[in-house]
Image: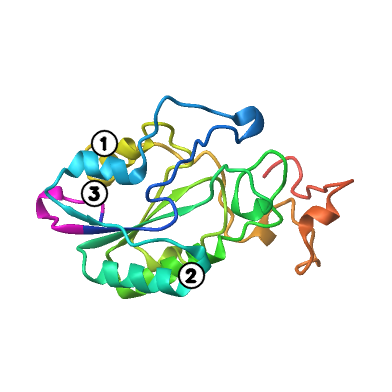
Amino acid sequence: VLPLDKNELNSLALIGKYVDYDFYTVGTGGSGWTNPPYQVTFLEGMQNKLGKDVELVTPKYDENNLDQTVADAVEAAKNADYAIIYAGLNSTSTSDPNVADTEDGDRGNLDFPPAQLALIKAVAAAKPGKTIVVLSGSIYEVRDWVDDVPAVLQTFYSGMEGGNATADILLGNLNPSGKLTNTWPKRYEDTAGYVPGNDAVDQRELKKDDVTYSEGLYV
């Protein structure tokens, strides 16, 4: 499905939490605080590369009204040539470290954000074979949805020109030749840091004093 041929596109549905998201908000991030002079969002990148030749439909994303968010996304996807969902994590400070990468709190699991999971599942079912997922942030489980879509692009934190770079990859202007820098486990339970027999317990509470890595010298 990738790269997309812009000469054959009439419309794209750009869906999800991070379509037009500011990843580098001033004043957050602690020692990782960055304050770039500008940021090209994913939406701006697609606008820059496609101009007015392709209609970009951007349904509203509101986790406080998830049913409407999903319904609007599904409708937009059905009426577009392709649906691109921008999902994952961010580095904004939050009281819930399970939905953001922060230095002042560990994530209790590798669960994919549930609202975004519901969105991907619904859109992929409505637009089979033509739903692309662009991810941001660090590692999480993707087993609940990855087989439902034909293409996934991991951008991690792509920087101030990330929107342009991501659009170039999606449209085939650049070859995404980068390699994954981490091992992505299928399940959190498969990682060496998981404490067996405590599925219903926040793993962070079990690791305040000791963390046992059981894989040995050779992984």
Q: Please identify the quarter of the rendering in which residue 109 is found.
A: bottom right
Instruction: Give the class, few, some or many, for how many residues have Cα within 10 Å of label 2's Cα (few <14, many ≥20).
Output: few
Mark 3 sits on what residue? 3
Position of 3 relative to 71 (above/below): above
Tell me where residue 119 appears, x and y as whole percent: 44, 67
Q: Earlier in the sequence, mark 3 or mark 2?
A: 3
Callout 3 touching callout 1 (CB < 8 Å): no
Q: CA distance from mark 3 to mark 2?
A: 33 Å
Position of 179 relative to 119 (above/below): above
Given residues 172 and 75, the one toward you in this image is 75
Q: Residue placed at 63% from the left, 43% from the top?
A: 93
Q: Split into 4 quadrants, where in the image is the N terminus?
A: bottom left
Q: Residue placed at 18% from the left, 44% from the top?
A: 50
Instruction: Give the class, few, some or many, for how many residues have Cα within 10 Å of label 3's Cα (few <14, many ≥20).
Output: some
Q: CA distance from mark 1 to mark 2?
A: 37 Å
Determine whether the residue tagged by mark 3 lies in a helix, strand or loop. loop
Say whether residue 53 is visible.
Answer: yes
Q: Residue placed at 10% from the left, 50% from the top?
A: 7
Callout 3 touching callout 2 (CB < 8 Å): no
Tell me where residue 161 appears, x and y as whole percent: 36, 32
Q: Amino acid at mark 1?
A: Leu
Mark 1 sits on what residue? 174
Q: Earlier in the sequence, mark 3 or mark 1?
A: 3
Query: Is residue 67 located in the magenta-colored stretch of the structure?
Result: no
Mark 2 sits on what residue? 65
Q: Amino acid at mark 2?
A: Asn
Q: Which residues are magenta?
A: 2-11
Determine whether the residue tagged by mark 2 lies in a helix, strand or loop. helix
Determine whether, in the image, residue 128 is placed left or right of residue 67: left
Q: Please identify the quarter of the rendering in which residue 197 is found.
A: bottom right
Q: Amino acid at mark 3?
A: Pro
